[in-house]
Image (tube, rainbow, N blue to C red):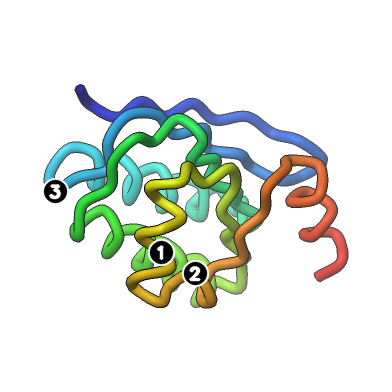
Amino acid sequence: MSMKISTRQVDGVTILDLGGRITLGEGSVQLRDSVRDLLGKGQKKILLNLGEVNYIDSSGIGELVSAYTTVRNQGGELKLLNLTRKVHDLLQITKLYTVFDVKDDEASAIAAYSQA
């Protein structure tokens, strides 16, 4: 199963709804390309909705970190939304949960951008 990405805008925040698997190869490349594309268009408030992501491997984790770093270096913000239990546990184990700004609901995630 490959990864699906759909993009939408809410109050100036670009939300990437991700579904499927973020793994070595196709999934991580799609994520990287999507984030770079948004930054290229000047969209610096990016929210990754991981509610439909059922699996992330180590390269997928690396891609999340890379996306986060790229966005930060461009003066933007990247937040994570709707982590599944599996993804949440993975971020806890790898100690990355404290690196990312993780939100549980879309409204509070979007509100968090306007405060910055």
Secondary structure under tag 2 reads loop
Q: Kindly report the distance in space between the C-alpha atoms of the residues bearing marks 2 and 1.
A: 5 Å
For badge 2, the amino acid type reads: Tyr
Q: Quadrant of the N terminus?
A: top left
Location of residue 5 by image quarter: top left
Report if the CB atoms under discs 3 and 2 are less than 8 Å apart: no
Using the image as rendered, state which of residue 16 and residue 22 is in the foreground: 22
In-image side of 102 versus 10 (left or right): left
Position of residue 73 measured from the top left corner of the image (x, y, whole percent): 49, 77
Q: How many labels sit on residues?
A: 3
Residue corresponding to mark 2: 97
Secondary structure under tag 3 reads loop
Q: Earlier in the sequence, mark 2 or mark 1?
A: 1
Q: Kindly report the distance in space between the C-alpha atoms of the residues bearing marks 3 and 2.
A: 21 Å
Report if the CB atoms under discs 3 and 1 are less than 8 Å apart: no
Position of residue 26 measured from the top left corner of the image (x, y, whole percent): 17, 37
**Rendered residue at 61%/73% (across/down):** 75
Residue corresponding to mark 3: 24
| Residue 105 position (above or below residue 80) | above
Q: Earlier in the sequence, mark 3 or mark 1?
A: 3
| Numbered label attached to residue 91 | 1
Q: Quadrant of the C terminus?
A: bottom right
